[in-house]
Amino acid sequence: MAIVINLTDIKTILKNVDVVAAMEEGFVQYSNGNTVVPPVGELLFSEPKGEAHIKYGYIKQDDYYVIKVASGFYDNPKLGIASSQGLMLLFSQKTGQPVGVLLDEGHLTDIRTAAAGALAAKYFAPEHITAIGVIGTGIQARLQLEYLQKNTPCKTAWVWGRTTESMEKFKVDIGTDFDVHLASSPSEVARHANLIVTTTPSETPLLLAEDILPGTHITAVGSDTSEKQELESVLLAKADIVIADSIPQSKSRGEIYRAIKDSKLSLGEINELGQAIQNPALQRTTEEQISVVDLTGVAVQDIMIARAIYTNF
């Protein structure tokens, strides 16, 4: 009989899990060829605007395989419902029997994404952070800022959102631990911050190449389909370092996909996060370099966090 773990228990278990370390192990396993991760399944909706992603796979010689369904419906907050929804299913890799149902309501997807952002900053952010820039004001924007504190304890943040109301709400929600400045545009964020995280579902670029100062690191989180784009393609061409969480996925989605489609970048100029973690030569070597990590979301992240919750229940 499968164990059902609800969101309340999941949040309690997460307090004792080092999710950033779990993401690091997962990306290394993935880049070393020790996982089976099929292409992403995807459903896109127009009325109302939303999407559902199906990600699944396993680590070779592990005990489990995982199937994750996560959705984002952007009008949900108007209904008093979180935009992120979903669940994760664990099965025995030996028998195929279901062993765990994680009713996380999309929370684990949000957490593992934020942890991946912290991991990206750990290896690619400049040593001295003047301020953290956040493009977007939703759940992921807040989590990215919070999880960055694990390795980047900068308390100054510049935030841009599409409405003044959303930015002011973000400032209230994030609390008094941070010195939050509200920007009038994404370019103003880039003028003040040298570590920037983009977290929106935008389909038109928000950050332009001319906005980015030398030494800036950008973690792009929002573009996880072929239609979305937060970074101008020329920006990736300008960058000294471009990292994909998954090179195969970058052929069909994300910032790298758009830059290649626009003939501003080639696959040969990209390295994979799990490879770069293991090779300092692929990481930042000077404070003047511009780096971009494109996080499209890989099933190995779901495997690692689902396994951690289940084994610690």
Image: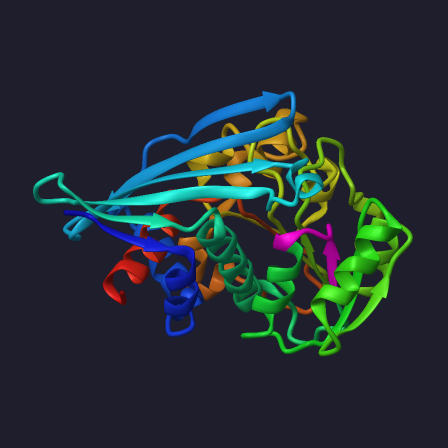
Looking at this view, name the residue that lies furthest to the front: 79
- For the C terminus, the image quarter is bottom left
Looking at this view, name the residue that lies furthest to the left: 95
Nearest to the observer: residue 132 or residue 209: 132
Magenta stretch holds residue 235: no
Chosen colour scheme? rainbow
Q: Quadrant of residue 167?
A: bottom right
Looking at this view, name the residue that lies furthest to the right: 184
Residue for point 46% across, 56% down: 112
Q: How many marks?
A: 0
Stretch in magenta: 133-140
Nearest to the observer: residue 90 or residue 149: 90
Query: Is 269 displayed left or right of 195 in the figure?
Result: left
Residue for point 88% across, 51% down: 164
Q: Position of residue 95 (x, y in %)?
A: 8, 41
Query: Is 18 displayed left or right of 61 in the figure?
Result: right
Image height of 305 relative to 174, above or below = above
User: Is residue 86 shown to the viewer in this render?
Assistant: yes
Q: Position of residue 122 (x, y in %)?
A: 54, 68
Nearest to the observer: residue 182 or residue 264: 182
Residue for point 75% across, 32% down: 204
Q: Position of residue 22 (x, y in %)?
A: 36, 63
Image height of 130 relative to 161, above or below = below
User: Is residue 296 shown to the viewer in this render?
Assistant: no
Image height of 225 relative to 185, above or below = above
Query: Is 293 displayed left or right of 63 in the figure?
Result: right
Q: Position of residue 212 (x, y in %)?
A: 79, 53
Magenta stretch holds residue 137: yes
